[in-house]
Image (cartoon, helix red, strand yellow):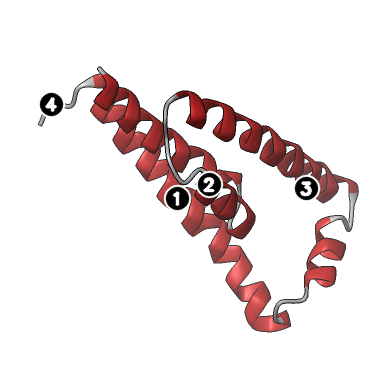
């Protein structure tokens, strides 16, 4: 089966989005099962040491940059429901929201050709 470049990228972005949801959630669900929705505990554990704080701060800054990109690029391309990517980011993370946005952006670019 032959894929054009655009179609191949769409599939790769979609696979990345699926993995970007499944892998982080595989770690979050056991935490929730053990502790419930204890947000203060989640943040205490996230910033418990320098290494985890490094990753936590990286994700927070990346999330803000993603939101700026989603709204500027999404409006430029005439994409709708841009708030869904922010919701995906807040619910799961950049690992879901960014490739999902790129998947739908790629579809929009393909439609515009």
Give x and y (percent) for residue 35. Answer: 73, 81
Residue in the picture at 12% in, 26% down? 2
Q: Is residue 32 above or below residue 94?
A: below
Q: Is residue 22 above or below residue 1?
A: below
Does dot 2 land on a helix, a strand or a loop? helix
Q: Which residue is mark 3?
A: 56
Q: Which mark is residue 109?
A: none
Give x and y (percent) for residue 96. Answer: 51, 48
C-alpha span from label 1 to label 3 = 19 Å
Q: Which mark is residue 19?
A: 1
Local crowd size for mark 3, using a 10 Å CA cut-off: few (<14), some (14–19), many (≥20):
some
C-alpha span from label 3 to label 4 = 40 Å
Q: Which badge, 1 or 4, is on the more N-terminal residue?
A: 4
Q: Which residue is mark 4?
A: 2
Q: Which badge, 3 or 4, is on the more N-terminal residue?
A: 4
Local crowd size for mark 2, using a 10 Å CA cut-off: few (<14), some (14–19), many (≥20):
many
Give x and y (percent) for residue 22. Answer: 47, 58
- In the rendered image, the quadrant that contains the N terminus is top left
C-alpha span from label 1 to label 2 = 16 Å
Residue in the picture at 62% in, 67% down? 28
C-alpha span from label 4 to label 2 = 30 Å
Q: Which badge, 1 or 3, is on the more N-terminal residue?
A: 1
Which one is closest to the eye, mark 3 or mark 2? Answer: 2
Q: Which residue is mark 2?
A: 85
Q: Is residue 5 above or below residue 57?
A: above
């Amino acid at each position: 089966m032959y894929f054009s470049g655009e179609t191949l990228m769409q599939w790769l972005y979609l696979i990345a989005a699926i993995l970007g949801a499944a892998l982080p959630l595989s770690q979050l669900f056991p935490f929730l099962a053990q502790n419930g929705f204890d947000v203060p505990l989640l943040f205490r554990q996230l910033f418990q040491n320098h290494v985890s704080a490094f990753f936590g701060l990286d994700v927070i800054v990346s999330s803000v940059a993603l939101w700026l990109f989603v709204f500027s690029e999404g409006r430029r391309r005439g994409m709708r429901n841009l708030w869904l990517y922010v919701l995906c980011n807040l619910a799961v993370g950049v690992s879901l929201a960014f490739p999902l946005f790129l998947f739908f952006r790629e579809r929009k670019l393909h439609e515009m050709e």
